[in-house]
Image (tube, grey):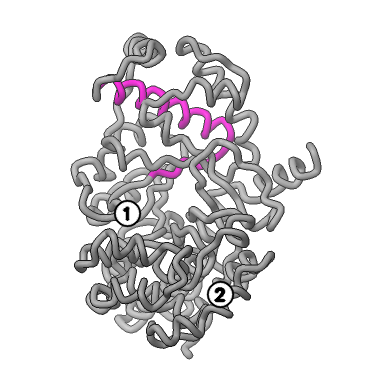
Amino acid sequence: MRELAKHIQQTPLMDTHEHLHKETEYVHNGPDVLEDLFDNYAQADLEVAGASPAATKRLLDHSDPDLAGRFAGIRQAWERCRHTGYGEAVQNIARHAYGMEEITPKNLEAARARNAELRQPGERLRILKEDGNLDHVEIDDFCWPCLPDESGLDFFLYDLSWVEFCRGMVNVPAIDKEVGIDVRDLKTLREAMAMIFEKHGPCAVAVKSQHAYHRTLLWQERTEADAAGALQQQLRGKELTEEESLCLGDWCWARGVELSIQHNRPFKLHTGYYAGQGYMEVERIHSGHLCGLLRKYPTARFVLMHIAYPYSDELVALAKHFPNVYVDLCWAWSIDPFSACDFVRRMIHAVPANKLFAFGGDTRWPNAAAAYSIQARAWLTRALQAEVDDGLLTERQAIALATRLMRSNQQECFDLNGTRAAIHAKAKGG
């Protein structure tokens, strides 16, 4: 193995984006073999390849013990998509977690015992730390609380979710329950948002929103009067128009960015491709829609995720132009590994080297996260080795750059020490 490849294999990756289930869920209601293999992005490729929704639903139903029957319903579709990025990740799980070179009914039956061994207390952390060689994971579980995770206090870090606010959704009962403030107007809403950050911001590694699934990424500055009017409509129980939702969402989004600056937390934003299949609205997902927000808040740190695929050229330009933009390759290696590989090379020659993060799996189960990290290492190696082979980098430079993309850039952007110290204090009752 060449020195560059060895270095990338041995260096612990900082995993900046996951949706991992908690330890108790994994142990007591976690995936059987077929779920472990396919309960990730591969199910979208299966349906695009011709599998019926009923077949994929049965595939992922662990209450059905008939592994062969469940697999049979998607087997033809699997043959059609096994070479995609999603398919490659499935094969990584099969090979590295279960010792399967081919997914067959016989091999699935043989893997039952191994699956039971893997779903034991402590295995979730071991899989991620040892099999995935991850330094830590940053988890978005779609809520405000970022509570200490006793299964790995320093390892499992959490994002504070801002997605509902960015969508213009103000959940008054949930806010009252969380921070004891009855939202009646913009003043009390602002107070509630500040209290959410006071309560959960110290233990949060970042703020996160994926509202591009539901509305445009285009942000506009909104007046207090317009936002107040939209909020009052919602508080009266009236359904907001799209423009009213955007107005209130933009106002709430801006307050979240201001609080992220105040609390020294990066703001992560989903850009680009949608998970699933059959519903994407491409006009929403351009990262270029964010220019107004990036200009308005030059001291915020924005982490733009998933390389804005398939509009990656725009993202290269944003990262080159705006000092407050960072780019995360999370999920991109499995969406389209060749495009991600090319993206890394274009970033190297267009953008300062401190702007790019190498990995986030964006998955729910630990074996999937480990498998996606294996995939990321392989394709990052290809990208950097191509730079060496083309005479654009020396091997020594490529190794230094790999360290930067895998670890150093994340350490510079995220307050990992401060977050971990706050988590430990909270765990001790502080």
The reply to whether residue 397 is visible in this rendering is no
> Mark 1 against mark 2, which lies toward the viewer?
2
Residue for point 49% across, 55% down:
18
Q: Main secondary structure of the magenta part?
A: helix
Q: Is residue 70 visible?
A: yes
Helix, strand or loop at mark 2: helix
Where in the figure is residue 330, as x and y percent of width and height? 41, 58
Which residue is located at x 30 percent, y 38 percent?
214
| Residues drawn in magenta | 243-269
Taking the image as shown, residue 241 lies to the left or right of residue 145, namely left
In percent of width and height, residue 193 lies at 53, 24
Q: Which residue is mark 1?
A: 275
Mark 2: few/some/many CA within 10 Å (<14, 14-19, 20+): some
Of labels 1 and 2, earlier in sequence is 2
Residue 45 placement: quadrant: bottom left
Q: Which residue is mark 2?
A: 115
Q: What residue type is disc 2 on?
A: Asn
Between the residue at mark 1 and the residue at mark 2, the CA separation in whole angstroms equals 26 Å
